[in-house]
Amino acid sequence: MLDIGCGTGMPVATTLADAGFALYGIDPSPTMLARFRAQVRHAGAACETVQDSRFFDRRFDAIVMIGVLFLLPEAAQQAAIYRIGRALLPGGRLLFTAPRMACRWTDSLTGQPSQSLGEARYRALLADAGCRLNEIVRDAGGNDYVDAVAA
């Protein structure tokens, strides 16, 4: 599995590693990545952005991108989804967070401008990348999780 924007590894990567998954993480922050490496000792890791990562030269059974995609401008979101679609093995899964409705806001954790392209646009981008939007699930905190499957 690949965790894009893995941060410190808490709680996503540590949960996946504890469940026995082979894991790789990328994050552009050297500080966050150092904490990730300490938390998830057997994971591969690289200090890279989603736009420039060399991990997309590999193939994965699953890719998670929690709290990252919506921080990217629209063109970068499109490129990331395309790269992810090419990196997933057939039947591979993608899980990312983005509001179901198209909207813009300032991210409360990073202070960065953020935007969701909305369900219809994500569905189309996923299809162009060879994936199918399976479902969108909302958690108790109002966060939407997009689950997609590679063809």
Image (cartoon, grey):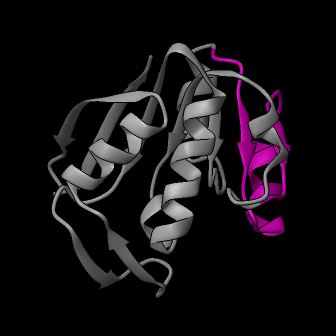
Identify the residue shown where x is 46% and y is 28%: 130
Percent position of residue 9, x then y: 63, 46
**Corner quadrant of residue 18:** top right
**Residue 46 visible in the snapshot:** yes
Of 15 and 125, the residue lying toward us: 125
Quadrant for the C terminus, please.
top left
Identify the residue shown where x is 70% and y is 27%: 23
Identify the residue shown where x is 55% and y is 33%: 85
Identify the residue shown where x is 64% and y is 50%: 6
Answer with left or right where residue 115 lies relative to residue 71: left
**Corner quadrant of residue 137:** top left
Of 130 and 18, the residue lying toward us: 130
Relative to 65, say whether 147 is above or below: above
Percent position of residue 99, x then y: 24, 60
Percent position of residue 60, x then y: 66, 22
How many marks the image carries: the answer is 0
Relative to 12, say whether 90 is above or below: above
Answer with left or right where residue 8 lies relative to residue 19: right
Quadrant for the N terminus, please.
top right
Relative to 77, say whether 90 is above or below: above
Where are the magenta residues, as a range? Answer: 21-48
**Residue 68 visible in the snapshot:** no
Residue 47 colored magenta?
Answer: yes
Residue 70 colored magenta?
Answer: no
Percent position of residue 150, x then y: 46, 21
Relative to 26, say whether 150 is above or below: above
Answer with left or right where residue 106 lies relative to residue 45: left
